[in-house]
Image (cartoon, helix red, strand yellow):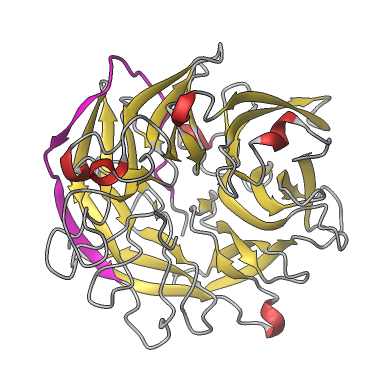
Amino acid sequence: MQHRRNSRSFTVALFAIVLFGAATNALARDWHVRVVASLCQDDYCSGGAAPGTLSVDSAGNLFGVMSSGGLRGSGEVFELVKESGRNKRTFRVIYDFCALNGCMDGGSPQQTGLVEDGAGNIYGIASSGGAADGGTLFKLTPNKNGKHWKLTVLYNFCSKNSACTDGGQPHGVLTYQGASQGQLYDGVSPIYGTAYYGSHGKGVVFSLMPKQSRAGGWGEKVLYAFCGKAGGTDCNEGENPYGVTLDSMGNLIGVAGGGSGKAGILFKLSPVVGERKWTETLLYTFCSLENCADGSRPLGAPVVDQAGNIFGSTYTGGTTKCFNGGVGSCGVLYELTPDGTETVLYNFCSLKDCKDGAEPQGTLIADASGNLYGTTISGGGHDNDFNAFGGGTVFRFSGGSLETLHAFCSEVNCPDGEYPYPGVALDSFGNLFGTTEAGGPNQSGEVFELTP
């Protein structure tokens, strides 16, 4: 089952992972949930909001995107400004896409988070629009008081030729050196990402950085194009990459596949000759065990610790049947060690009525103590009109156990939100922030805060 999917410093979780023990039953202890804002509060959001992962700055302000809705129906970037001395935030749109003729500024910003540099500029990707209608990398620059923002298109995807050899429809998490240590982007080093299409029609991994020339501007380099060889191992079960993570050695670790009947893969790209060339290594192919007991369809960039262990989730697969013995399986949390051994840390929907959640989607985050946090788009145990087993959960995996922090749609009409799709963000006080795709007074989603 699928559903619709001034200088500040963003808080970025540290990936110092120390996991131990075997997964046990989920704990039914809710944190306190508070609705920060209800989405689609105006007349320009009839198509829904489709909100994404939030980012939190050091002042407690939240930044996020809606990939649809807005003045022109092509999405927007918004800010929730924390009011001084009050536990309240004011919702403010800082950019509405498709403001230029032909959507030359881009459209449908991606739901997988934003990047900020030391000067307070925000970077993100739009999956459509631009000069070649293949999407854009954009930068938003605030004025002195931070109330007005200027958008600059740094790169137009699919602009090199009709075959889109430079990639088209970018999506997934953007990353850079220092991101996993909580450092701000320096504004000049490479930003790494993925695009759904490429020279072979199956996606690329790319880097983007300012050109070192008088002409200025940004240049793009394709690091790897999937399915470049007939029958290649990366094309059997993995195509269309979905986000990458830098490990401590400068390698890019990512997932591909998970759609169009593909089980999905974990891959590594390693730089050689001063990053002029990159080589691909297939780390793991999912659904390698009978009935996909090892998981299938990874849909979020993995987390990598200092020892090279990889952690992530799959949308389906595992040993439990979804929703009291229904068709299909509900997804897993997994670990892959440097020697290539994959271990299932947790099988979702292991509890009656899927109270522990089902079908994890989005990217995991980790705190400095090694706890993993994420979301499931289904389960939680609260019946509603559309899903007999709930509107999704936020979970924490710690010390070998999974704990449900909140199960959504806990009241009539889901005022706390429903379907928390893209994952959560963590602030310096241990509070979690996220968005839901439905629920709330406008049935277009909520921005929520979870406090321990």
User: Which residue is painted at 30% across and 36% down in the image?
Assistant: 348
Quadrant, the N terminus: bottom left
**Magenta stretch: dominant SS?**
loop
User: Which residue is painted at 86% across and 59% down in the image?
Assistant: 160
Give percent across and percent down for residue 436: 32, 60
> Does the rendering let one see residue 85?
no
> Does the rendering let one see residue 316?
yes
The single residue placed furthest to the top in the displayed view is 339
Give percent across and percent down for residue 9: 43, 48
Is residue 405 depicted above or below 127 in this figure? above
Is residue 294 depicted above or below 388 in this figure? above
Residue 30 magenta: yes
Compare residues 184 and 298 and report the one nearer the observer.
298
Compare residues 240 and 156 and report the one nearer the observer.
240
Residue 280 magenta: no
Horizontal side of residue 51 vs 200, given as left or right: left
Is residue 216 depicted above or below 92 in this figure? above
Asked where in the image residue 217 lies, by quadrant, the reply is bottom right
Give percent across and percent down for residue 5: 45, 60
Magenta residues, start to end: 9-38
Compare residues 187 and 6 and report the one nearer the observer.
187
User: Which residue is painted at 74% across and 40% down in the image?
Assistant: 226
How many badges with numbers are in the image? 0
Asked where in the image residue 327 lies, by quadrant, the reply is top left
